[in-house]
């Protein structure tokens, strides 16, 4: 599992990236914009009001399996705040 630094290259806390900018940076770091990589994804986004939205190309069973795998991996490893796993 690739770990992406959740600070997204911010030089300081004064500069605040929008959610769309963070997603673009994370996508670039995960697979690259020009990548030919094939696979599946689950994206969970939480907005300022705490509303979580999920986007995926998997069916419900596949999405739940992937989320459980991610949860188990995070629980068994050192998790640092500000990291995207």
Image: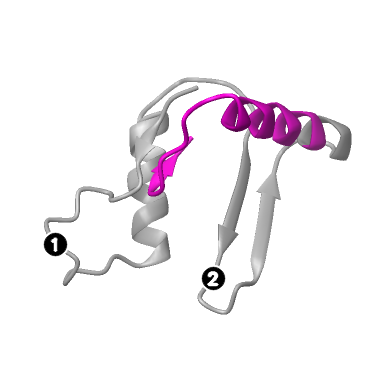
Residue 71 in the image, given as x and y percentages of width and height = 67, 34
Give the magenta range.
64-85
Residue topped by disc 2: 47
- Examine the image and state in which quarter residue 12 appears: bottom left
Residue ID at (77%, 36%): 63
Mark closer to the chain start, 2 or 1? 1
Is residue 33 among what the camera can see?
no
The mark found on residue 45 in the picture is: none
Label 2: state its secondary structure.
loop
Q: Is residue 65 magenta?
A: yes
Considering every residue shown, the one lying at the far right of the view is: 61
Q: Residues within 10 Å of mark 1 (few under 14, many from 20)?
A: few
- Examine the image and state in which quarter residue 40 appears: top right
Residue 25 in the image, given as x and y percentages of width and height = 33, 46
- Examine the image and state in which quarter residue 26 appears: top left
Residue topped by disc 1: 12
Is residue 42 among what the camera can see?
yes
């Amino acid at each position: 599992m690739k770990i992406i630094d959740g600070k997204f290259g911010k030089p300081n806390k004064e500069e605040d990236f929008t959610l769309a900018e963070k997603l673009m940076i994370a996508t670039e770091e995960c697979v690259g914009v020009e990548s030919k990589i094939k696979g599946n994804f689950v994206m969970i986004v939480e907005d300022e009001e705490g509303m979580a939205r999920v986007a995926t190309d998997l069916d419900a069973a596949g999405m739940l399996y992937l989320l459980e795998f991610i949860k188990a991996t995070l629980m068994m490893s050192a998790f640092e705040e500000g990291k995207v796993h």
